[in-house]
Image (cartoon, rainbow, N blue to C red):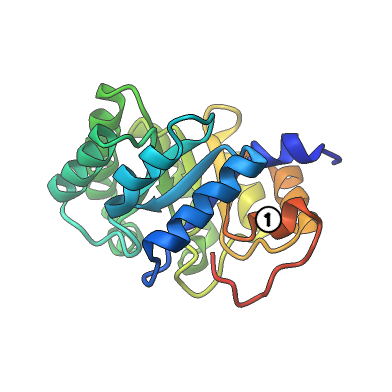
């Protein structure tokens, strides 16, 4: 696949989820996103008011992660975090699936958790992505996570937090796209450091990319492999 720089930028959720992110580094992330006109800036929910202000005169959307990065959080707490972030300007919410309950086969718990978030997010007219953390799952668990996300009303399924043992893999993106068809979006995130890797994820079925190496990718460089998300 070949895409213009402008078209590729619109696949990208330019991401800064580092624990030591400062206001200065978040501002830099926003400035870079505005420079390249990415789809969004994705941050921890604390930073949403600041990011919303930084992006107010642009086409770049603020996105918040919730229940991040482990997913082991009470649904009511996730709903509160999501609603607060949306009230403060977030246009999309990326939640982490309850990984342990998914692996234990507790499908109703997982589905109800996602549905609570989907209902709350959709009530405010926004989008919900569900992070599966594919590096911790078998293929069957990835399929199940996608199925439960779809049944619960999510808008996207997403590979990774970027904070576990590995990020997005081509095979996982293909499997997720095969499972959800064209009914849901698929976001590949974590470990994408070059333009070639980004295009390969899109070829595999990704409709959105979560990257911190946005500038390197869009200027056709290769980012530091230790750069994180």
Quarter of the image with the C terminus is: bottom right
> Which image quadrant is residue 155 in?
top left
Q: Tell me which residue sits at (60%, 28%) in the image.
A: 182
Q: Tell me which residue sits at (57%, 59%) in the image.
A: 212
Q: Tell me which residue sits at (68%, 55%) in the image.
A: 215
From this view, report whether residue 68 is shown above or below residue 109: below
Image coordinates for residue 151, horizontal then vertical, percent: 37, 33
Marks counted in the figure total 1
- Regarding residue 207, the answer to whether it shows in the image is yes
How packed mark 1 is, by other alpha carbons closer than 10 Å (few <14, some 14-19, many 20 or more), is many
From this view, report whether residue 131 is shown above or below residue 57: below
Q: Tell me which residue sits at (26%, 38%) in the image.
A: 117
Image coordinates for residue 109, horizontal then vertical, percent: 22, 49
Q: Which residue lies furthest to the right in this view?
A: 2
Give the left or right position of residue 26, taking residue 117 as reference: right
Q: What element carries label 1?
A: helix
Nearer to the camera, 168 or 222: 222
Image coordinates for residue 170, horizontal then vertical, percent: 69, 56
Residue ID for mark 1: 215
Nearer to the camera, 46 or 79: 46
> Which image quadrant is residue 7 in?
top right
Image coordinates for residue 227, horizontal then vertical, percent: 59, 72
């Amino acid at each position: 696949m070949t895409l213009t720089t402008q078209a590729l930028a619109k696949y990208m959720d330019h991401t800064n989820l580092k624990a030591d992110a400062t206001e200065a580094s978040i501002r830099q992330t926003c400035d870079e996103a505005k420079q390249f006109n990415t789809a969004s800036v994705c941050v921890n929910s604390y930073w949403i008011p600041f990011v919303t202000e930084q992006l107010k005169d642009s086409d770049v959307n603020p996105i918040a992660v919730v229940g991040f990065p482990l997913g082991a959080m009470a649904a009511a707490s996730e709903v509160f975090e999501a609603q607060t972030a949306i009230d403060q300007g977030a246009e999309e919410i990326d939640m982490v699936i309850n990984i342990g309950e998914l692996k234990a086969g507790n499908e109703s718990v997982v589905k109800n958790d996602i549905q609570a978030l989907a209902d709350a997010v959709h009530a405010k007219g926004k989008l919900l992505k569900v992070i599966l953390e594919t590096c911790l799952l078998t293929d069957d668990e990835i399929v199940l996570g996608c199925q439960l996300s779809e049944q619960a009303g999510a808008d996207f399924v997403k590979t990774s937090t970027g904070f576990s043992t590995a990020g997005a893999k081509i095979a996982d993106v293909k499997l997720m796209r095969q499972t959800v068809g064209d009914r849901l979006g698929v976001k590949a995130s974590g470990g994408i450091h070059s333009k070639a890797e980004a295009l390969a994820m899109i070829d595999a079925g990704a409709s959105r990319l979560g990257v911190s190496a946005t500038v390197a990718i869009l200027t056709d460089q290769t980012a530091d492999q230790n750069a994180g998300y």
